[in-house]
Amino acid sequence: MYQAIVFLPLIGFLIAGLFGGSIGAKASEYVTSGLLVVSAVLSWIAFFQVGFGDVETFVVPVLSFMKSGGLEADWALRIDTLTVVMLVVVNTVSALVHIYSIGYMHHDPDRPRFFAYLSLFTFAMLALVTADNLIQMFFGWEGVGLASYLLIGFWYKRPSAVAAAIKAFVVNRIGDFGFLLGIFGVFVLFGSVNLGTIFANAASYLPAAGAAAGEPVLTFLGHALDKQAAITVVCLLLFMGAMGKSAQVPLHTWLPDAMEGPTPVSALIHAATMVTAGVFMVARLSPLFELSHTALLVVTIIGAITAFFAATVGLVQNDIKRVIAYSTCSQLGYMFVALGVGAYGVAIFHLFTHAFFKALLFLCSGSVIHAVSDEQDMRKMGGLRKLIPYTYWTMIIGTLSLTGVGIPLTIIGTAGFISKDAIVESAFAGQNAAATFAFILLTVAAAFTAFYSWRLIFMTFHGKPRASHEVMHHVHESPPVMLVPLLLLSVGALLAGAVFKFAFIGEGYHEFWRTALFTLPGNEVVEAIHHSPVLVSLAPFIAMVVGTWVAWVFYIRSPKAPHELAEQHRGLYAFLLNKWYFDEVYDFLFVNGAKRLGHFLWKRGDGTIIDGLGPDGVSARVIDVTNRVVRLQTGYLYHYAFVMLIGIVALITWMMLGGSL
């Protein structure tokens, strides 16, 4: 069953990719979507068997992968609760995105290629989450990077899409370089890349409390590191990979630009799967991260800053997809805060619920764009509520879940209400030195999230229409093939939190996760959140109410207020609108610097030195000599006689001088 879950999407990719031109677009759509539906159903079966059954971690061998000296890595599927949770997330969202895309991409001439890319991405993500060793994980890690590059740049005739694809690929290479160094470091410290071996040795890796530091075990950047310093450096390198893949500050800049791809791509890659790969990786390697409090502190700080930063930028964005993209970036920050304070189950719970409501929001935005003739600027929308009612109400459900609407101190509420509030409470209860700092930023970010989420709803669906009469005349609801995935995701956005809270973060926590997630004895953050002060439990709810009220005042009661406020604070507005000028700073420091260096090496190094002194210089000297020799070929007899006379005189002189010597 598990081999089928992983390899059915690969089969769909091969069929659509190799034979799509022969079997046609319809067949490609149905084959890839059908195989994903089967894989999703099997994933749910595995989820209940492993998560709620008496099944310990086991490994399903696939094939011999790599063996070189002491390095041995077979392709095998590691099956535990964390794996099956990710299988459900990846395959459920991917299957619904495949089905949705049948309607959304209906007029695109390259549908077989699009569906092939979707299935390739899904397979790569499945290879990542089922990895039993770090080499296999890195294979899936790079596979999703490749597939995302292909999907973001799917409309390759658009310069903006090509630029966004390249940007995503390059920024992720920075993080991946750190991840690769981290894998090397793990192999040096533990002598293996197999997760089972690493986890078995992690518990006894550090010396006992009070013992001497010991001999250096790793040299990094010329510094000899003992065991504690070495594991900290390795964890930070691994986290560097997570920062790139999961769009954490300062490696976040690729995520908003990736909205240049088709909207289903945004829902699949940048809402539920690829961007959560970093969260999954840190959770999977939690036995290593628990050995370094410094690394967990960095994870907490970066997550909190990212959650706050992305929320502030989302306040003023006007592109409907970019607002949701920055929301994704912010929610990923929440997840990393939970990881940083040791609440791994809480982080994965939010990853699980986030998959439903964020995919729902992206697909709803696609339905809106589909209805208004591919317009994405919310300033050119408005008044769509009664024209596309199904899209409106499903987007309301997604917004309710994202903003965390529910009844405080109960389990009555949307999925986001239960999982996000648990993260905020975890930050307060955490023993991390940055926990209070994170709690404050997450609470403020919750208010900002409510504001920009309802701002999107009010600008898009309420008020007077701001689109042209022609556009409004053609506004229409999406076909059933697009609406059915929205309805199914709405169910998850509403109920996933209440249904699965008991297992993920409640009393059934230990029985559900067993050995899939690791926490040191005494670091029971999950239990601590159930005894948080009432005011702490109410904080995210109060923040949500304040943000929602301000959005209503600004965009329903006093629609001119936002413009007046922006005029009064032009500097702050420009700062947020330009995303804290991260792109401009990077252009100045890195892009333009690299261009100047490249131009210097091209003109001076390559042109002046290498070519000037090398082939071009030699050929130029040959030409100079031949040009001078050619001047002697005048064709006049007396010139030749004169030269002969000079030669004879020179010869006689040489003989006379030679004879005298």
Image: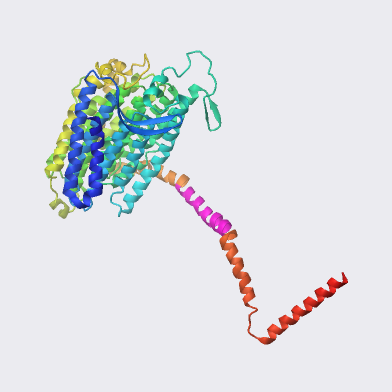
Quadrant of residue 648 in the image? bottom right
Q: Quadrant of the N terminus?
A: top left
Which residue is rendered at x = 32% and y = 23% of the image? 344
The quadrant the C terminus occupies is bottom right
Nearer the observer, 447 or 501: 501
Look at 65% across and 86% down and name the residue there.
636
Question: Residue 530 lies in what quarter of the image?
Answer: top left
Magenta run includes residue 606 = yes
Q: Is residue 653 left or right of residue 93?
A: right
Q: Could you tell me if residue 242 is visible in this image?
A: no
Q: Is residue 567 magenta?
A: no
Left or right: 257 as drawn, with respect to 37: right
Q: Residue pushed farthest right?
A: 660
585 versus 75 height, above or below? below
Q: Position of residue 567 (x, y in %)?
A: 33, 44
Front residue (pair 191, 306): 191
Q: Residue at point 30% right, 20% down?
A: 536
Image quarter of residue 461: top left
Q: Nearer the viewer, residue 659 or 396?
A: 659
Q: With respect to residue 129, does 318 lie above or below? A: below
At which x and y percent is residue 139? Answer: 36, 37
Q: Residue furthest bottom?
A: 637
User: Is 601 on the left or on the right of 129, as rendered?
Assistant: right
Can I make out residue 16 in this image?
yes
Residues in magenta? 591-611
Query: Residue 213: x and y, percent?
Result: 53, 18
Q: Is residue 507 above or below residue 618?
A: above
Percent of width and height locating residue 92:
21, 34
Q: Main secondary structure of the magenta part?
A: helix
